[in-house]
Image (cartoon, grey):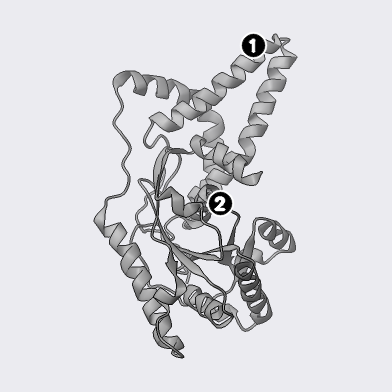
Amino acid sequence: MLKIFVRLGLPLFCKQIQIRNKEALASKGPMLITANHPNAFLDAIIIAAYCKHRVYFLARGDFFSKPWQYKLLRLLNMMPVFKQNERKKNKELNNHSFEQAEAILSQNGILLVFIEGICVNKHELQPFKKTAARIALRCQEKKIPLSVLPIVITYDSLNGPGKTVCLEAGTILPETALLPFQNNAPQNIQYFNQALFNYINGVLQKRTRPLSKELNLGAKLISIVACLLYILPYSIIQKIVHNKTRNTVFYDSVLFTTILLLYPVYLLLITWLFHFLHLPFTWIVLMILLHLLAAWYAVQCLPYPFKNRPENGKYQEPR
């Protein structure tokens, strides 16, 4: 149900989402997805939305610091993993997450790991961490027939609605192709990371980021009118989100999530207003459909309707 809700909401934020090698995203587990990480948890939202089967994630442990956050994120199939300097006091939680990850894979589940272990708002790979390789090694030791799917996700903008996204799934590999050495964990980890780095980096280097198409004059005029309908509520939301996420990588993710949650409320308020004005039911339905069409048109037809901050690597997660 949540996946359907997100899939319906993405066209109101992304102009286009290009999927390459869609068949791989329909594969069953046990499968470990390794992906690059340019845009915080929006990366996870998009990847999970377009995978056919349920996807579990490893996420930054500090997101789970409050009980309500822990419960909410666990409902979203996320498990905490803590950084090196946090592991001593959270060792038990870390071990529990890895045990859960192993259990999910042993039951033919799918696990997503952002292999860089850090998010930076740019399309240049950071050095890979060992988490994904260690999970693969544990599966090999437990005789779990794991497959590994590398995914590359790129954006033409890391900074608000109207973006074009490209999600490219690679070739599914058996773990034996990435862990070829017998009884040599360090060498296997190095080989695993280098092979995936070469693939993901090769995809990033071979092609440019997805670009939005130029509009004709008529489409520009219609999209400007559509944007004017939403400029006041959007500006309020955008300003609050911008202030709350200043100097972080989370602006895009939080903005999308906020719009996804508040837009149905906005439509309900509009519906109530029209009902209060005693408009006929047919007119109310028509006006709501026009609002939806205007929202879609504003996002689809303006490449970058509301830019407000620099991108390309100025912000990154604290190490």
Image side of residue 227 versus residue 291, left or right: left
Image side of residue 12 versus residue 272, left or right: left
**According to the image, label 2 marks what residue?**
244
**According to the image, label 1 marks what residue?**
283
- State the residue lying farthest toward the bottom: 183
Q: In this view of the protein, can residue 307 be seen by the observer? A: no
Locate residue 79, reporting x and y percent. Answer: 63, 66
Using the image, determine if residue 176 lies above or below residue 208.
Answer: below
- Badge 2 marks a residue whose secondary structure is helix
Locate residue 75, reporting x and y percent. Answer: 69, 56
Residue type, label 2: Lys
In this rendering, the label closer to the viewer, 2 or 1: 1
Q: Residue at x 53, y 65 (%)?
A: 31
Task: Give neighbour class at mark 1: few <14, some 14-19, many 20+ (Cα, 10 Å).
Answer: few
Count of labels in the image: 2
Q: In this view of the protein, can residue 300 be seen by the observer? A: yes
Image side of residue 314 versus residue 259, left or right: left
Using the image, determine if residue 193 lies above or below residue 216.
Answer: below
Task: Give neighbour class at mark 2: few <14, some 14-19, many 20+ (Cα, 10 Å).
Answer: few
Locate residue 203, reporting x and y percent. Answer: 30, 58
Residue type, label 1: Trp
Locate residue 276, reporting x and y percent. Answer: 74, 15
- Badge 1 marks a residue whose secondary structure is helix
Pick whichever, 150 or 12, lies toward us: 150
